[in-house]
Amino acid sequence: MWARRDLKSRLITYLRRALSIFLVVLATGAGAYLPLAAYHQSSTLSVGEIRMSVSPGHRGALDVYVPLVDWGARFEAIRAPIRVRVDLQTVNRGVATGLAQGQSLDIDKVRAEAEQALTTYLMRLIALTVLSGAALGLLVAFAIRSRVPRLRWTAPTAIIVSVGIGVALALLIPPRGEISNPQYYAHGPDIPRALEAVEAAQRTPGVLDQELDAQLVGLARLVIEPGRRESLAGQPTITVASDLHNNAVALGVLERAAGDGPLFFVGDLTDRGSPLETNLVRRVAHMGDPFVFVSGNHDSDYLSRELAKEGAIVLTRRGRLKADGTYGPVINKIAGLRVAGYDDPFERKSADSYADRFDNAPQPGMQETFLQWLRPLIGKVDVVMVHEPGLLTTALQVLEDDPPQSPLVFFVGHTHKTGLEKDPGVTVLNGGSIGAGGTGNLAESTSLSLARFVFTTEPAFQPLAADLVSIDPGTGNSEARREILEPETTR
């Protein structure tokens, strides 16, 4: 009996000790988190004043951001789940005036200033993290010492954990390797602001890697190695959108984004393709110059015919659909591009009362059929429009093994998420959902999004860049991200 009581007493002691250590570890972690979330530092460089801070809980990246113009560049060069942010608060007027008058900027000096400022900030941040974690951990250790008398277990735990956090931060936060391949982005109340920032950058003289210079007054050069790519100013641009899903409210946004330029719509303009829905979205045929369309699984043969009658360029695997129901060429010259389109295999049929024919995924036979349709077009076509990305699976595998000699771009939709895939000779661009999931998908948490595709046709077709733009329907905040599409040999 006494042995049983002694065993129970020892178990309770071990449990209390384990619980106390857990509480100390938890408190130490909480203490270490506080400086990460709250500590920031300002430094004055020769080009202006910068503010440095970190945001834990994000994908590791270094952000260079200018609140005054709401534009920045992001570099995924940090391994810790922490975003290091450098905000340009003020600009040295003398430096800005000198640059405007053609004076040179001592890039090495500014880079050294920025590196020193960032190094000092990170060292102080890590030191504060260790001290704050240890302090709160020790405080909890002393607070529970009446329950667990032996501080020899809890106090060292607080110190070891806090030091371990500091070592991890020192190893994982500082950017490693070359800082390159930026993602440009903007946050604002609506899409025009983000797109205007892109256009303003395109008008800036100089190389593409210096797009931010006009607004950052040279700060981008702190982290971007100057390139030799030519400016994108004046290059042709088209708008790529899909998946409106009968959300007529979004038509105004789509119309403003497309402007007078070409608009390529990659399927799911409606939910069923019925005559009622067709009447609601009929005006889309007159957006863009021209409006180019391929059907999705939520569209119908009736919708395609009506759009063709309205003057839209409706592409199918059999060729361009004419207003009288006949077909023209498969490859069409549009906006200087050789374009073909593949109508969706699950397109609804008016003869079947627009019944849903979609079965969640393309069958292997459909992927092979698409590949056989595509083979004779490779080398003769620049852009292929197809709503369902899953149809490309087999074709992309073949193209990966045998890349095309001339660039081939696929415009896709269906997933409701913006996306960009780049392989040798092949680009797959998804503009997301311009209808934010559509009126029939109100429970779906989807951003309203589209893409803009920048290219050149001189001396031959070459993709240059893609702007992926998304808008939160709830807040109206927008984000624009530029991805460069030039081949590695031209960089």
Image (cartoon, rainbow, N blue to C red):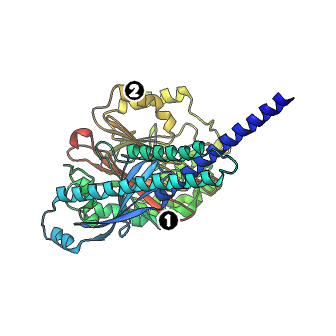
Q: Position of residue 71 (x, y in %)?
A: 36, 62
Q: Is residue 89 left or right of residue 146?
A: left
Mark number displayed over residue 252: 1
Q: Image quadrant of residue 200?
A: bottom left
For the residue labelled by badge 1, is the local secondary structure a helix, a strand or a loop? helix
Characterize the local packing of mark 2: few (<14), some (14-19) or many (20 or more) Cα atoms within 10 angstroms: some
Where is 331 relative to 241, above or below?
Answer: above
Nearest to the observer: residue 336 or residue 184: 184
Name the residue located 46 percent from the left edge and 66 percent from the top edge.
190
Instruction: Let me know if residue 220 appears in the view.
Output: yes
Nearest to the observer: residue 475 or residue 158: 158
Nearest to the observer: residue 400 or residue 169: 169
Q: Is residue 446 left or right of residue 481?
A: right
Where is 304 relative to 3, above or below?
Answer: below
Q: Position of residue 80 (x, y in %)?
A: 44, 45
Tag 2 near tag 1, CB within 8 Å: no
Q: Is residue 176 left or right of residue 83?
A: left
Q: How many marks are shown on the rendered structure?
A: 2
Name the residue located 63 percent from the left edge and 44 percent from the top edge.
150
Residue type at tag 1: Gly
For the residue labelled by badge 2, is the local secondary structure a helix, a strand or a loop? helix
Q: Which quarter of the rendered picture does the N terminus lie within?
A: top right
Q: Is residue 335 left or right of residue 350?
A: left
- Ranked by sequence position, the earlier of labels 2 and 1 is 1
Residue type at tag 2: Val
Instruction: Let me know if residue 446 appears in the view.
Output: no
Q: Position of residue 487 (x, y in %)?
A: 27, 40
Q: Choose mark 2 or mark 1, whichever is in front.
A: 2
Q: Position of residue 3 (x, y in %)?
A: 82, 28
Q: Which residue is mark 2?
A: 398
